[in-house]
Image (tube, rainbow, N blue to C red):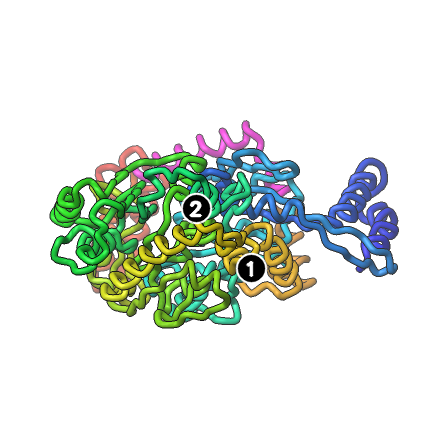
Amino acid sequence: RDWNEAAAAAPKFVSKNFGSGRYMRDWVSILEKVQVEQRKIQIVLDGNAKFNGESMEAQNWHIAKMLSESTSKSVSSDGQEHELQFDVSVIGSILEPPIQGVKLAKPVKILNNEGEFVSISPFPTGYQANMVIRQKWPPNNDIIPITICSFGCHVAQILPWEFGFLPQIWMAHLLDNIDWLWAPSEYNRDIYTRSGYPFDRTALLPAGVDCASLLSDGKSARENRSSNASKSNISTDLDTVTFIFSGGFLPRKGVDILLEEWHGVFCSSEDSFVKEANIKSNAKLIVHTSYELGYSNAEVDKMKEYIDSCDGKIEWKRNEWIERTEYIQMIKRSDIYLAPFRSEGFGLPIVEALALGLKSIVSVGGTAADDYMNADVEQTDYWNREMTQLTYPIQATEDLCKHPPCFGEKLCVFSPCKNMRCACEKLVEIPLWFEPSRTDLQKQMKKAYNDVLEEREMNTKNSPYMTKTIDDLIVKQFCWEDLRIVYHEKVLNTLSKSTLRKIPTFKIPSQDEQSTFWLYESFLESWVDWFKPEIVFFLVVLFLVLVLFVSKHVFCILLPLSKMLHTRNRDCMITRLKNVVRNMLTRPGKSRKCK
């Protein structure tokens, strides 16, 4: 029903059922407020939001900012056009830096009757969201409080995942408590469906990169190098071809693979490529890792051997957390990004490297990188010439994950973590990841190296070949500026559909049930009025006296009764029963003798 009609009918309804005065005014005010709020789309983002935070926190910050700046048009039943705004709130402990118009609501939990902590609404009474978007680690798959998101409200979860199948323990919660699973990559969407989540309840919603901060000086990494190379004196740094990796020190990231194969190509004196190209002094590898899990001490020692035997050409920045500005400059000073991963949910650092103009050597063949890489290793003309210059795919084959953190059907990456080992959960099936081709990796590293040298030589001749900007790149579609319309339309499209999760329902009692309830309630109210403190005290004392009296005689009652029951003579049984009663009533003081 139109809110204007409801507001007009409200005074009569309220005065009839609730009386007049302040109650009527309250109800009318509520309806008037709701009518205004209907012109806003209430969005709740469940998860911390931090511009320079970890990947999910940074994604949440940009989503909140992007939606808060979005508007849409709506036409009411009277034909008037209204502007719909997104009113965004973040449920979490962090919103940094603050975003104009976005509210931070810290999560609230209380102890229920079963002794469990449950979430309740941190918003004022009466608040109802149109949509809740969840993204955090570990993921929150619990039922959303009905005081936040009730009937008609939609719940979507962005869930990056890297190991072939989802945890078994998540599935029932995802099916019952989530309307939509949004996948940052097609690989993730495939994981959802193969784990048993309905395909028609999934959607692709790519992760984004902040191209504005990446290109804050208006130049990509290669454009910076081009401008330097055009000078008369080329610096020594420009003579070095720099490979780089940045991410977790994890087996799924393939750090062991890139170190072993890079060492084999650029540090081994036996490799013919090293002899022919004479590159002993002008190839460099930077490995930047911020956290680690899954490698054994023996594997770490082996990787250290590769580094030590490479004459200082490999720099390992281990367990170093660097600010984003420093990170961007580190990438810009490099030429080739190495990512021979075994599994990725999306690959944000790879897309950022491509946006900055680095050549990128990446695992493809069913991986998340297929969304932005040339999946054909041999193809030379794909999308456009610019993309062929940047993408160097290596074929990967999906295989069972037999290396920690995989242990049979279990995966050990869950909280809590202690002594380099985390809690384990069984997946729907045995964990999977990819094994990249070592041959492809070696070939693409050599090719990318030669291409860098060739392009530098062309730049010194003032060739216009390197003047393209990010607008010419396919990865531009992953910039937040271009994703704005994608997220906006995805939210509006989702709101137009029916809710699919299970929502707690309440049975409306019949007329007879309501009458019974009111009688029962009236009975309780009368008893509550009757039970005054002095009456309760009297009844307690009376009860104690009765207990004391009965306890004195219970033995003397049971003993004759037991004898009576064992007597076959009916007359004797009756006589004994009379004696028991007579003793109880006329001789209470002598009843202890039980004669």
What residue span does the magenta drawing correspond to? Answer: 524-551
Q: Is residue 369 left or right of residue 558?
A: right
- Identify the residue at image location x=58%, y=60%: 505
**41 over 432 or under it: above or below:** above
Name the quarter where the C terminus is drawn: top left
Which three-letter amino acid code belongs to the residue tagged 1? Ile
Q: The N terminus lies in which quarter of the figure?
A: bottom right
What amino acid does circle 2 point to? Ser
Query: Which percent across, then down, holds residue 149?
Result: 59, 52
Asked if residue 502 lies left or right of residue 549, the reply is right
- The one of 575 and 247 positioned closer to us in this rendering: 247
The residue wearing badge 1 is 503
Give the residue at x 66% y 63%: 496
**Residue 387 image offset from top left, x and y in percent:** 46, 62
The answer to whether one can see residue 113 in this image is no
Query: Which secondary structure lies at badge 2?
Result: helix
* Element at label 1: loop
Judge whether residue 533 is colored magenta: yes
The picture quadrant where one finds residue 510 is bottom right
- State whether the magenta stretch is mostly helix, strand or loop: helix
Q: Relative to 187, is 135 above or below? A: above
Magenta region includes residue 58? no
Foreground mark, 1 or 2, reads 2
Q: Kindly identify the residue that appears in the image at 31 percent across and 44 percent down.
A: 240
Q: What label does residue 440 carry, if any?
A: none
Please give left or right for residue 44 compared with residue 325 in the image.
right
Q: Residue furthest top?
A: 534
Q: Which mark is residue 55?
A: 2
Are circles 1 and 2 on residues that touch, CB within 8 Å?
A: no
Q: Position of residue 477 (x, y in %)?
A: 55, 58
